[in-house]
Amino acid sequence: MPRRFKPMTPRTLAFAITLAVAPGAALAQSSADVCPLGAFTCPVVKDDFALCKQNDLLNFYQPGLPTEGDREASPAQVYGDRFSSPDSNLYHLTGDTSLQRLDQLLRSDSLTYNADTTAYDAEGHVRYQERGMLFSADNMKGTTTPEYGVANHVQYQLLTSRGNGVASQAIMLDQDRDKLHDVTYSTCDLHHRVWEVDAKTMTMDRDEGIGRAHNVTMRLKGVPFLWLPYLRFPLDNRRQTGFLYPSFGSRSRAGFFAAIPFYWNIAPNYDATFTPTWFADRGGALDSEFRWLTPITKGAVDFNYVPDDKVADRSRWYLTLSNQANLPLGMQWNTSIRRVSDDAWFQDFGQNLTTSTVTLLGSSSYVTKSTDWWNAGIGADWYQIATPGLSSRAAPYRRMPRLFFNADHPIGGPGGPEWGINTEAVRFVQPQKIGGDRFDLYPYLAWPLQGAAWFLRPQVGVRYTAYNLPRPVAPGGPTHPTRTTPIVDVDAGLVFERQVHLFGSDYTQTLEPRVFYLYVPYRNQNNLPLFDTQPLTFDFWQLFTTNSFSGADRQMNANDLSLALTTRLLDSDGVERISASIGQIRYFDPQKVTLYPGGKAVDYSGSNYVANLTVSLNYNWRLTGSQQWNPNTDETDVSTVGLQRRLWGDGIVNFNYRYRRGLLEQADMSAEVPVGAAWKLVGGYTYSLRDKRAIDSFAGVEWDSCCTAVRLLSRHYVYDFKGDSDSAIMLEIQFKGLGAYGERTGSFLRNAILGYQ
């Protein structure tokens, strides 16, 4: 049986004339748990009805009724305080009467039941309950076999959602279908209808998960603002073909835009979404996404096409494709392709600073296999420049093909020595540069030893790298240069613990000294090319690595000793409240290997001092910081500080400072501030101290009531590295239980405000 997609987040609609909201049966959810401080993602709250009052109909809800079983095979049972029986099949019951059949429970002041025909007639204070619905009525009559019933002057509540309303008449056609006349629907409180949907007739088919309504009007505060002759909508989370909720907004580089997605539920394991969009300044566009999921493959392709950009005066497009396929012998084939028609696409159509400043698009395709102790693969990587003014010569080398094999296995069983090997063979291609082939081999032996309060891991290996070049790097140099370098390292540490009483609480404090010795003899590498190698950014974890370069074109020389000390404060639940680390590398020999020939060797006696700090003594405050101080120049090279404060449950304020000498100095603030139960203010501001200008700012307001939410944001941001800026206005109106109109603001706010809920 093919696997199914998870239901799409927006509910789908399909109707004859135009778009409208739909009374879908969204599940009622409580407020999300408080997002942990420092978390990058927080629980997404969908249709939070925490501000709603309890539905009056729930006062007669009877818990404990069966939720599964066959109604047709279950007998009907009748009860009453008093009853009379003119014959053996007809019963008249009064007082607290009830008729129950599995999950169906009908209660009233008086009840007449015919055991022969299964006909019933209930009068006075009628209350009906089944698995998915609860309603009250003036009277109700029908039969249990076949299942049929008619109730008049109904007030109903869906038990699988907060959906509720009234109807002049409700007809139970059978076990799975109901038909309501002169019906209303809303997720608002019964006596405070911010919005409401009216329909002449509405049929609910729970077997198909589809509702159908005719002569539909939607009202806001009692004022009609949308009419439709026909409406088809989902009753549950099953995917349905139809229109998604429209979005709209404004961007200064594209103007006002409006998008109307259409979702096509092709099959349980195939679907597609087509999103026609109109930009006031640039014209029409179509975004088409197709997804598939089979027993052996899953993936998606998204093609965004602008047939005639009125500003650029040409057609433009953006393509992404991802696919994962299971192959015989336990292998996998993973493909990811990203291509764009021109290098200005993201500047013109990107929605935020992240997408508008995309510099490089990477694509890859690999066949791989993994086991418990080895993994291998063959594939290719290629790239496309996506920044105006940047030469295609700046694109990385294509790796076509690339082969790798890595293994790590104990010798003689767990706990003993281990052998391992890392290998890679690559052909580098760049139309505007000289390419070549590279083979990199690193076999090693290690012996991981550890106890309750210590660890020791010595390792020795040899790195061999060989090239096949069409011509030498330097005149007179070899076309087949090689490099052979032994690498020896020893990693060791201790863990001390003690109990302390601080700030009125008991904690466990650890003291964790760690040393890492590395020896790599110097090898002259000036005759080796630079295909995919760059210096790694120095940080705390660089104290314990064997190379300061990425890729295999450079291997650092070293006779170094890294010294580090970490202390932690753990509460009684084992939660880390304070963590502080500091470390430095001591150089016994100069570091002679540089990225480019003729570079200056590092002849200092020690590296930067690196320190990290995290403090979270309670659930409302969190302080983080990192510092790199260069003792050789007596200057700070890197400094970051972050402060996060939780406000009144789901509010948050973030302050951050980032500094990297010679590159950037920025400060930013972002906040989500509750103002009463229904209102929130959101905002953010990022300022470049180096450039003396704001590079991103936004401000907005949220109003969140029982059944309606409105979010309005205004944003101004820098969209390229030249400092050009753009503006945007985002408006979203959410009718809880139905969906949202306008540009989705939630994903933007979750990225812009750390800890946003």
Image (cartoon, grey):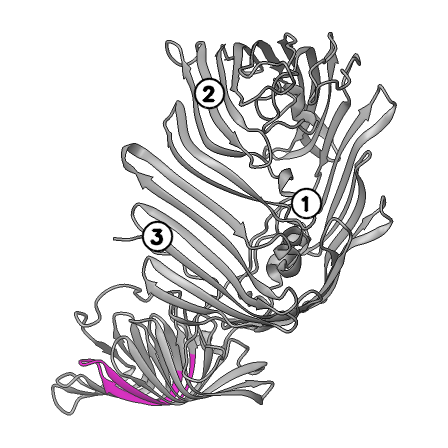
Answer above or below: position of 632 versus 683.
above
Q: Which residue is mark 1?
A: 390
Whether residue 511 is visible here, answered yes or no, is no
The residue sitting at 64% across, 59% down in the picture is 351
Q: Nearer the viewer, residue 486 or 606?
A: 486
CA–CA distance in space, label 3 to label 1:
38 Å
Which numbered disc, 3 or 1, marks the residue that appears first in the sequence? Answer: 3
- Nearer the observer: mark 1 or 2; the answer is 1
> Mark 2 is on which residue type?
Thr
- Nearer the observer: mark 2 or 3; the answer is 2
Quadrant of the image occupied by residue 110: bottom left
Q: Percent x, y for residue 95?
A: 33, 85
- Nearer the observer: mark 3 or 1; the answer is 1
Q: Nearer the viewer, residue 282 or 373?
A: 282
Instruction: Based on the picture, tell me whether residue 139 belongs to the magenta stretch.
Output: yes
> Mark 1 is on which residue type?
Leu
Q: Percent x, y for residue 461?
A: 52, 10
Which numbered disc, 1 or 2, marks the residue that appears first in the sequence? Answer: 1
Q: Percent x, y for residue 741?
A: 57, 72
Name the secondary structure under disc 3.
Answer: strand
Answer above or below: position of 313 versus 90.
above
Q: Main secondary structure of the magenta part?
A: strand
CA–CA distance in space, label 1 to label 2:
33 Å
Q: Nearer the viewer, residue 106 or 315?
A: 315
- Binning the other alpha carbons within 10 Å of mark 2 as few (below 14), some (14 to 19) or many (20 upward) gives some
Q: Which residue is mark 2?
A: 423
From which residue to which does the magenta span run? 136-156
Residue 293: which numbered mark, if any?
3
